[in-house]
Image (cartoon, rainbow, N blue to C red):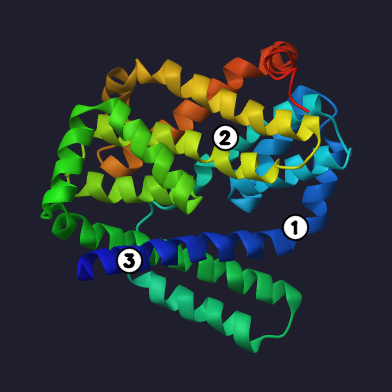
Amino acid sequence: MQLLIWFTVYVGIFLLGMFMMKSGLYSLSAQQLKQWLLRFTKTPLQGFLTGIVVTALLQSSSAVMVITVGLVTTGYFTFRQSIGIILGSNIGSTITTEIITLDLGKSIIPMLLLGALLVFFVRHRFTLSVGMTIVGIACLFFAMDGFRQLAEPLSTYPVVNEWLRKTNDSALLGIGIGAVLTSIIQSSAATIGIAMSFLVEQLLTLPAGIAILLGANIGTCVTGLLASIGSSREAKLTAYTHLWFNVIGVTAFYFFIEPLASFTKTLSAAPDVQLAHVSVLFNVICSVVALPFTNWIEKAMLFLHQKDD
């Protein structure tokens, strides 16, 4: 029970870190982000590139989806314009998974203290935003270190051990776990971070970690779906497109999990870095392949959801 409590605490610290980093980055570039979304989304390619940049700055595809759904609801741009942003945001979100694989070691505590100093003692909007960003990043690495320390002790529990064994044997179960866990904690990065900790301790195989990652890409769509409740038909179509796109992408990659695992092992010796690279490959390939078919995607969504209000 004590280990489970600590695990929950580290999940909370990770989510707090994501929130603070996102808030700090948003405060630094809030007006520019909205202007970019409104100005550079006239074509699918512009929307695609803007989606990458905005998500990379916010470090949250869910936040970008909520903003996009809101802008579609208010009529600032159309459902068709939002498709490019969806494709780009999936790529921009992979930066977070690459960041959390870095090893900051003893730099975490000084970063936390510096960020706290800027937040609480320097009364200026810019320094406050920078401080929140630094604190957020420090919290992410602190939580990742905690996950790694708890991974092996947690695996001694019969329930966790059985879960690990079944996940290593079944990719479908891994996808389901990734989707459900991400839906609950509302952060695909946290789910992937947890999977990385078990990978580093060699308790999960890379194919099992990839399956969890794929599931996390489905679970992250829940935020956009919740944001679209009670909104316009076009806003709902935006959320549905995000879900359909990720489900189809995951279904396609499901049959290539083993070859993908073999390939990424040649890119890095570190299991967590391998998983981060898989996240980049999955999202880049899916988005780039889908980009030329934006018109078809729009027609397909209109046909599938023609009865929705």
The part of the image, by quadrant, that contains residue 234 is top right
Q: CA distance from mark 3 to mark 1?
A: 29 Å
Give yes or no for contact between labels 3 and 1 (Cβ–Cβ under 8 Å): no
Question: At which x and y percent is residue 149?
Answer: 22, 62
- Does residue 21 sit above or below 256 in this rendering? below
The answer to which of marks 1 and 2 sits earlier in the sequence is 1
Is the residue marked by circle 1 packed among few (<14), some (14-19), or many (20+) residues within 10 Å?
some
Foreground tag (3 vs 1)? 1
Label of residue 29 in the image: 1
Label of residue 105 in the image: 3
User: Position of 57 compared to 69: left or right?
Assistant: left
Question: At which x and y percent is residue 244?
Answer: 58, 24
- Which residue position holds label 2? 91
Label 3 element class: helix
Q: What residue appears at the point 45 percent right and 24 percent down from the top-left corner?
A: 250
The answer to which of marks 2 and 3 sits earlier in the sequence is 2
Q: CA distance from mark 1 to mark 2?
A: 19 Å
From the image, which quarter does the N terminus lie in? bottom left
Q: Does the rendering let one see residue 147? A: yes
Label of residue 67 in the image: none
User: Position of 170 compared to 42: left or right?
Assistant: left
Foreground tag (2 vs 3)? 2
Q: What residue appears at the point 76 percent right and 35 percent down from the top-left corner?
A: 235
